Amino acid sequence: MTEQRLEAERARLAVSDSPTAPWRLWGPYLAGRQWGTVREDYSAGGDAWTSFPFDHARSRAYRWGEDGIAGICDVHGFLNLGLALWNGRDPILKERYFGLTNNEGNHGEDAKEHWWVVDGTPTHSWMKVLYRYPQAEFPYAELRSMSAHATRQDREPELSDSGALDENRFFDVEVTYAKAGPTDVCAVLTATNRGPDAAPLHLLPQLWFRNTWAWGRDDRRPHLTASAQDGWSRVTAEHGALGRYTLHVEGAPVLLVTDNETNEVALFGAAENPTRYTKDGVDRHVVSGEAGACQVVGPGERSAPGTKAAAWYSFGAVQPGESVTVRLRLVEGDGHPDAFGPSFGEVVGARSAEADEFHRTDLDPVRAGVVRRAMAGLMWTKQHYRFRTRDWLEGDPGKPAAPTSRKSPHARNSHWRHFDVADVISMPDEWEYPWFAAWDLAFHTVPFARVDPAFAKEQLLLLCREWLMHPNGQLPAYEWEFGDVNPPVHAWAALQVYRSEPTPDRKFLAKIFHKLLLNFSWWVNRKDADGSYLFEGGFLGMDNIGPVNRSEPMLGQWRLEQSDATSWMAAYSLHMMEMALELARVDDSYEDVATKFVEHFLSIADAAAQFGSGGRGIWDETDGFCYDVVSRRLPDGSVESKPVRVRSMVGLIPVLACAVLEPWVDAEVPGFTRRLEHLMARRPELARFITREPDGRALLSLLDERKLRLVLTRMLDEGEFLSPHGIRSLSAAHREGLEVQIADQEHRMGYEPGESHTPMFGGNSNWRGPVWFPTNALLVEALRTIESFHRGRFHVELPTRSQRQVTAGRAADELVGRLVSLFLPDSDGRRPSDGKRVESTDSPLWREHVTFSEYFDGDTGEGLGATHQTGWTALVASLLTDRRHTTNQ
């Protein structure tokens, strides 16, 4: 293997720093689910799930995007290539993954299929996905019925529970993409019969245009034609902006052509359809044998123009263990002169070898495999996201029309009319969360920086761009409600990405810093109602962690002052300070801004430390822990305040607010040091939040050493927060439940290690006990920060009451070990994250595939929630490859 080949992917990355660089033009940007999203909801009541259900998806054109199985599209989302299948028994063509809506699932929305992203490279020169397709009729109705009869206390019924996969009666369909060039994509579809008997299979790779013409805003219509002439089977696609592309299909399949148009007659009882052929034309022809449902192109024929086409490969009896393969080649222009000649196999082989080299590591094979799968899944969840809120609110001149309810000032996202995005964005999950989320995305950039720092930086900047960020400085949370509030972790992520590169990119740091100045001001102006430096925040991403819905106003005159909101802002202040100091090394105009943020941090720290009637902060001296506080102003002007005595992750967030000032600050940013010394002389009570060393280093921390030790004592207690696989989101000391009084009302909650037992926030995620990767990764980083200052002199008992003393750095290492163990085989050869799911069986067909879940059972480590969450759970790749391990005990 030549050196040129070994460095090929890195060379491609070097010329691909732009989101629209040629090598990034084609990628896995096609969503796993478009139906049931807010973008497609044009209902009066705003119920996205019922407005556009799964049962409409095969027959109804989408307005804002597309979806498919193991599919790719161009960076603009115009032309899409995906896989459809039929086993001869299903009532519909399998064109997209099936799952239950939020109302149908006993724990909210839930994908009911099995697929894995196997491999990939950052420029998407190499991609591989495995889809497991049952040979029996897909049990759509049974899965709905099983979930309808299950309670919130029951496990989620899965496809494997229906019996549809018994005796391995399924096809493993592997889809591989290898780019011969930026606009030359080779695709291999291989289906293997894993069952004991011969079974039929129909493979139908499909090429189609997103419908951009039916809404009355742009009547330009692309078209594609299918041809089976001159010994070639091909589909030619013409688009005004994208140009011409040719899809070569190997062999002589039947070519089917229809239009990506809604079947108004079937869905809505219209007298006629706007076009002769509709989106479900291929489905109706293949499954129902309906004559005239689509154009059928025979040998020597050419179709009339359409906007959706399929190549129909029919395999009557695939023998047990036998594989069938279909090859495709999508090429810009008029096609390739020898599409399936020797160059095809050479490209596939070369890209496979280059991927092996790119992901080469000195980790052992098991850990290396976890890292590679995590990164493959993370790279696959990059999706084209298009949404223009103004058009959505007002409705299109064509269909669908906006309901009158959109005119209300309280309509969903009505205060975000500026929002206008058409970009590739990293999504939390391909199916359950096929839309961006602000704090999820920040965590995604940390593992992305390992392999693709340009994309990581672009994503952080993107969320701050004027077409996403609100004019008032707020970052959009997610499409269900842009105005919800996620934790302000953008600055932390920017620092992590900045520090991950050997050469400082201060231009990036300055750009993100200036944008975050606006966001920081929004927090201060909107979330600190009375200027007390105790913050509200609201939702803050941790769903049902509190006894009440923290996004809703309190009853009466009560106000909820949040331990986590206040602590997030303390941490945010320190992160902005660190960014300003770094920029001040080359531009002293940033010195004053750095002092602004250190003063803001100290003001928050002082307010958070107060306690006693009328001046209670988040710290509770009685329990040695941090709590949310409810307060109200009484008629006599005094303030009544009470702690919400629930030991949860909100009380651990204060640990995150810490930073180290290195000696170079005194030498290179002397103005900052002088201002800090002056502040300490004027307000000596603030000195308790700064610990200094003779060598010039200083530790800034929201919790002084005594309070930090008290909080860590609870955090590292296996009877409270410390689980075998990370830090729980709620103390296990609350297993028997507890009652708390909030705003003169009694509320009950308790430790729930697994799926949520409450419907709060849809009931599809739970912060009342499980282990979550994002907050755990932040706690690891905080412990490393403490270690970097104390250098082996700060010890904690791990676990609590074990009489075993370790350094903060060693505690970080051991916490990493617990988190990583979720994905590593135990003594029985089973991964804890597989739990009782089918992946834990002895069959190598299941055991070889690592799954990355949304969160993990606080007792057993079983993966729960979304099953393809290689968004923030891909942080495991960063933890496994972090070289900052300590040896001090």
Image: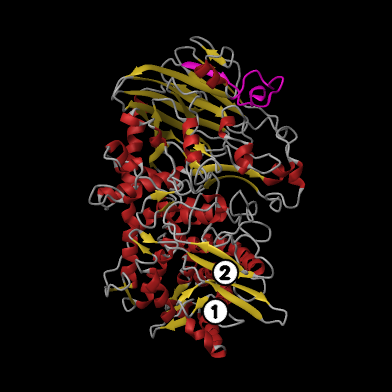
**Relative to the observer, which residue lies in front, 3 or 598?**
598
Instruction: In the rendered view, tell whether residue 347 sits above or below residue 364.
Output: above
Where does the image place residue 818, in percent across and percent down from the top left? 32, 59
**Relative to the observer, which residue lies in front, 794 or 21?**
794
First in sequence: mark 2 vs mark 1: 1
From the viewer's perspective, tell me whether residue 499 is left or right of residue 598. Answer: left
Label 2 sits on residue: 741
**Relative to the observer, which residue lies in front, 590 or 161?**
161
Q: How many callouts does the rendering have?
A: 2
Instruction: In the rendered view, tell whether residue 65 sits above or below residue 248.
Output: below
Extreme residue in the left direction: 827
Mostly what secondary structure, the magenta segment? loop
Discs 2/1, front: 2
Where does the image place residue 544, in percent across and percent down from the top left? 53, 58
Give the magenta-colored segment's residue range.
Answer: 254-279
From the viewer's perspective, tell me whether residue 881 is left or right of residue 405. Answer: left
- Name the secondary structure under disc 2: strand
